[in-house]
Amino acid sequence: MIGNTMSQTVVLGVIGSDAHVVGITILEQAFSAAGFDVVNLGVQTSQEQFAEAAADHDAGAVLVSSLYGHAEQDCQGFHQVLEEAGVDAVTYIGGNLAVGQDDFEQTRRTFRELGFDRVFDSETDPEEAIAALRQDLEITPTESERVSISS
């Protein structure tokens, strides 16, 4: 898949009944600037909508954002839905994932058990997620991308 542009498509959205749009807007801009093709599903996105978009766009990654603290309920069975849709993508989740959760390691374990490849807290810089995604998809930035990112 290296060098294949299809693998650089990212499906991004806010899951469940969460209506927080700022986070994904920032992520969309950051991932686009880093050379990814971003499909932004917006807020209040169902598991099925994520799966459908990921399948339609042959996405290399599905990025789930959740800021209202109910992500665990929203993500139950998510990876089964993706699998049934034939989606084979890296899955990330980030945000404020649990209400009153001060032990992020516990939260990380919970979401890893739900099937997510990487779990980020609400303080994560988009650059960290971009670096992780490049690593997971084995993408090396081109010379022109390196130049545009640093300028």
Image (spheres, rainbow, N blue to C red):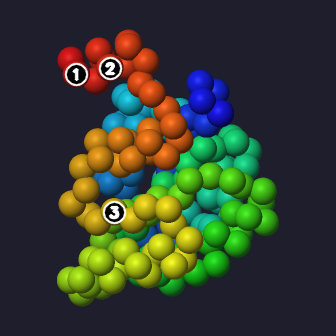
Q: Which residue is mark 1?
A: 150
Is tag 3's residue or tag 2's residue first in the polypeptide sequence?
Answer: 3
CA gap between label 3 and label 1 equals 24 Å
Residue at the location (37% across, 74% down)? 108
Tell me the kind of residue under disc 2: Arg
Above or below for 101 versus 25:
below
How many marks can you see? 3
- Point out residue 105 in the picture as x, y percentages from the top left corner: 30, 78
Q: Is residue 11 visible?
A: no
Name the residue: 49% across, 55% down: 63
Dot 2 falls on a residue whose secondary structure is helix
Q: Whole-percent x and y of residue 91? A: 53, 58
Q: Residue at x 60, y 44 (%)?
A: 60
Q: Which image quadrant: the C terminus? A: top left
Residue at the image position 41 percent from the left and 79 percent from the top: 109
What type is the residue that disc 3 sits on?
Phe
Task: Please indicate, yes or no, whether residue 110 appears anywhere in the rendered image.
Answer: yes
Q: Which mark is residue 120?
A: 3
59 to the left or right of 14? right
Q: Which mark is residue 146?
A: 2
**Residue at mark 2 to residue at mark 1: CA–CA distance:** 6 Å
Callouts 2 and 1 close, C-beta under 8 Å: yes
Q: Secondary structure at mark 1?
A: helix
Q: Please, is residue 60 above or below residue 37 in the view?
A: below
Where is 5 relative to 47, above or below?
above
Of 56 and 118, nearer the camera is: 118
Q: Amino acid at mark 1?
A: Ser
Q: Secondary structure at mark 3?
A: strand
